[in-house]
Image (spheres, rainbow, N blue to C red):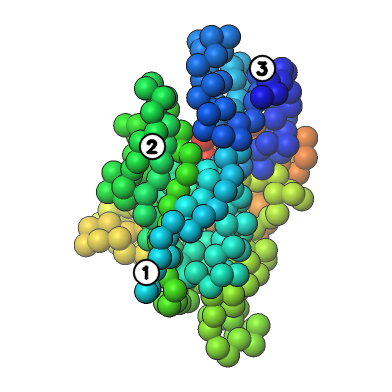
């Protein structure tokens, strides 16, 4: 293992923020991961486990050991008439895994095409897009218990998935690192085209017969048209979660803001799009030096290059305050501040 010192984390976070790691190592096997965790030289240091760095806001240099999870491998573990069970290493690039499934006609995650990040990071916040969440295809995951250094298996129920939530962001935060995830995918597809612009995009693409590939292509096209490519403009996708508000508050709000979009969650709660709130608060396309709010999707904060994490943090606070002032709604960040 190559343990590096004082290296730049810029290539390892999609915001493209400059921050250094005191120590940095990439692990390719579970054994390497265990070895580094047992190494007495690093035992008492803080540790940061890194996937694709796509949900990360680095506000300072990292004093401690950054461990990049590069555990690879995709294998079919079981199949029956309708379902195929595929296990993927935590370090596999999520989109590559989606493409593997699309090419093999395994249905279920085509709506999750082009989401940045790795397979191992995906369950942490139950990634979702265009009407599908990872929990819909999740079978189980394996994770290393950082105290006992034993591998444990987590079922769907054990992960306690919610909207951009799992047990790993709450009671088990910092206690486990995911090493692999197993998904159940369908041999016979049920297409999910109801969300947003999927149907419109399929029509524009002249798709007459639906297929896994066509849905994936449509999602990729929508994402490319709305979301900045981190390779060109630093960002970490949606910066905030879409807030869930009480029905009573929603009813009061639509009297003043009749075009406020909404998605019912249950009989008492409604989800409203943070992007809409931020746009209405006047932030869409805002730019201050090297940072700003994306011009086509107000939920995405961007680093045009050379911006720093604290500037983005301050901008996020201003956005939160103005949405609170205008709508009485508190936005919670989806990204993790380090
Ligand atoms: N909207 C605006 N102005 C904006 C942005 C959005 O008015 O600047 C409105 C849209 O017109 C639409 C609604 O807000 O009525 C929802 O917008 P969109 O469909 O673009 O999705 P979103 O709610 O902003 C969520 C996820 C995305 C995911 C898309 C598609 C969250 C926090 N974000 O965004 O996930 O790709 O839906 O399913 O739930 C991510 O988590 O990083 C991410 C990109």
Q: Nearer the viewer, residue 69 or 231?
A: 69
| Quadrant location of the N terminus in the rendered image | top right
Spot occupied by residue 219 in the image (x, y as percentages of width and height) = 58, 69
Apparent side of residue 137 relative to residue 233 in the rendered image (left or right): left
Closer to us: mark 2 or mark 1? 1
Quarter of the image where one finds residue 261:
bottom left
The reply to whether discs 3 and 1 touch (Cβ–Cβ < 8 Å) is: no
In the drawing, what numbered circle is on residue 22? 3
Q: Secondary structure at mark 3?
A: strand
Q: Earlier in the sequence, mark 2 or mark 3?
A: 3
Q: Earlier in the sequence, mark 2 or mark 1?
A: 1
Q: Which residue has dot 2 on it?
A: 168
Q: Which residue has dot 1 on it?
A: 80
Location of residue 133 with respect to 332 vertically, above or below: below
Q: Secondary structure at mark 2?
A: helix
Q: Nearer the viewer, residue 95 or 2?
A: 2
| Separation (CA) of disc 3 from disc 1 | 48 Å
Spot occupied by residue 36 in the image (x, y as percentages of width and height) = 56, 20
Spot occupied by residue 74 in the image (x, y as percentages of width and height) = 55, 53
The reply to whether discs 2 and 1 touch (Cβ–Cβ < 8 Å) is: no
Q: Is mark 1 within 8 Å of ligand 1?
A: no
Spot occupied by residue 285 in the image (x, y as percentages of width and height) = 68, 53
| Separation (CA) of disc 2 from disc 3 | 25 Å
Q: Secondary structure at mark 1?
A: loop
Q: Is residue 154 visible?
A: yes
| Quadrant location of the C terminus in the rendered image | top right
């Amino acid at each position: 293992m190559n343990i590096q010192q004082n290296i730049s984390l810029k290539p390892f976070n999609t915001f493209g923020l400059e921050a250094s790691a005191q120590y940095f190592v990439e692990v390719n096997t579970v054994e390497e991961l265990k070895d580094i965790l047992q190494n007495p030289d690093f035992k008492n240091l803080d540790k940061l486990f890194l996937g694709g760095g796509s949900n990360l806001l680095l506000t300072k240099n990292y004093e401690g050991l950054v461990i990049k999870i590069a555990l690879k491998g995709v294998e079919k573990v079981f199949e029956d008439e309708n379902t195929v069970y595929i296990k993927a290493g935590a370090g596999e690039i999520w989109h590559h895994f989606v493409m593997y499934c699309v090419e093999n006609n395994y249905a279920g995650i085509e709506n999750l095409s082009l989401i940045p990040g790795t397979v191992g990071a995906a369950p942490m916040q139950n990634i979702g897009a265009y009407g599908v969440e990872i929990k819909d295809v999740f079978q189980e995951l394996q994770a290393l218990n950082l105290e006992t250094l034993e591998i444990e298996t987590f079922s769907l129920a054990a992960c306690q998935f919610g909207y951009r939530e799992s047990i790993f962001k709450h009671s088990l935060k910092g206690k486990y690192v995911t090493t692999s995830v197993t998904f159940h995918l369908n041999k016979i597809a049920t297409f999910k085209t109801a969300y947003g612009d999927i149907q419109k995009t399929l029509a524009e693409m002249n798709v007459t017969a639906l297929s896994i590939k066509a849905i994936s292509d449509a999602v990729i096209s929508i994402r490319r048209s709305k979301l900045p490519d981190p390779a060109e403009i630093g960002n970490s996708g949606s910066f905030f979660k879409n807030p869930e508000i009480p029905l009573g508050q929603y009813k009061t709000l639509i009297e003043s803001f009749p075009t406020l979009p909404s998605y019912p969650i249950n009989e008492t709660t409604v989800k409203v799009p943070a992007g809409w709130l931020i746009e209405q608060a006047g932030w869409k396309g805002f730019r201050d030096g090297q940072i700003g709010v994306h011009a086509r999707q107000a939920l995405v904060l961007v680093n045009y290059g050379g911006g720093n994490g604290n500037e983005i943090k301050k901008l996020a606070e201003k956005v939160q305050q103005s949405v609170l002032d205008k709508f009485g709604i508190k936005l919670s960040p989806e990204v993790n501040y380090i």
